[in-house]
Amino acid sequence: MVSSIKIAEAAKLFENSQRDINIAFVNELSRIFHLAGIDTHEVLEATRTKWNCLPFEPGLVGGHCIAVDPYYLIHMSLSLNYIPKMILASRRINDTMSHYISSEIIKTMIKKGISVMNSNILILGITFKENCPDIRNSKIIDIVEDLEEFGCQVDIVDPWASKKHVFDEFGIEIKDFDKNIIFDDYHGIVIGVAHQQFKSLDFSSVKSSKKIIYDIKGILPKDCVDARL
């Protein structure tokens, strides 16, 4: 038990903001490593040989806690005439990761000689995290909108998300999940959420000169994808 509700709420804001900051740090390193030609997931695997390394990974930050609570702390800080520079920077980094990923998907397609206009893209997952049906503040929708602005035709499958909830929230009709997905219909496959069902899919026939696989979550081996965070 804590002494007051203020302490309890402050503890919640502290914990969620701390996680947001840690994820932002890894996201920034991921972008730096990419420019340097270094695979981030290999780096993270190496860092985990140290017992006290914090196991954060790059990716999208959505949901109704980590992506929201820092703003309460920011609001309180500004009302006290204090500018919370680290919290603001972390929010800015994490909020723009979806657009960074969109641009990397497009670049990967162009490098492989795939025409972006009228291309068919399949995004695996729309929930804000794996193995749950929660779509609140999902950043996948940013990627969908970005790709559509480039002229891509985007399909989404998610075995966890409610088709009705997705349509009500985003106006998007997601397709039914089938473990025997026909990848031949698509020029690009984007692994957006690490659902267990996606980990069991057979991607061996996908990687070709006419397709790309972009793995946001790093669930596939490096040599099985064209690019990943």
Image (cartoon, rainbow, N blue to C red):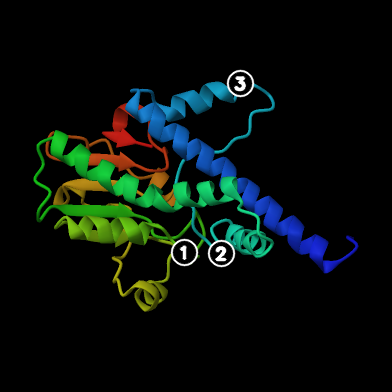
Question: Quick one: label 2 or label 1, which is nearer the N terminus?
Answer: 2
What x and y, as percent, mark residue 55? 59, 35
Amino acid type, label 1 = Asn
Secondary structure at badge 1 equals loop
Mark nearer the N terminus (1 vs 3): 3
Residue at horizontal 35%, vertical 36%?
228
Q: Which residue is mark 1?
A: 137
Q: Are marks 3 and 2 in contact (CB under 8 Å)?
A: no
In the image, taking residue 60 as reference, residue 78 lies left or right, namely: right
Position of residue 57 in the picture relative to residue 209 (left or right): right
136 relative to 10 in the view: left or right: left
Q: What secondary structure is found at the residue carrying circle 2?
A: loop
Residue 24 makes an appearance in the image? yes
Closest to the observer: 191 or 47?
47
Residue at image coords 39%, 75% = 169
Which mark is on residue 64? 2
Secondary element at image label 3: loop
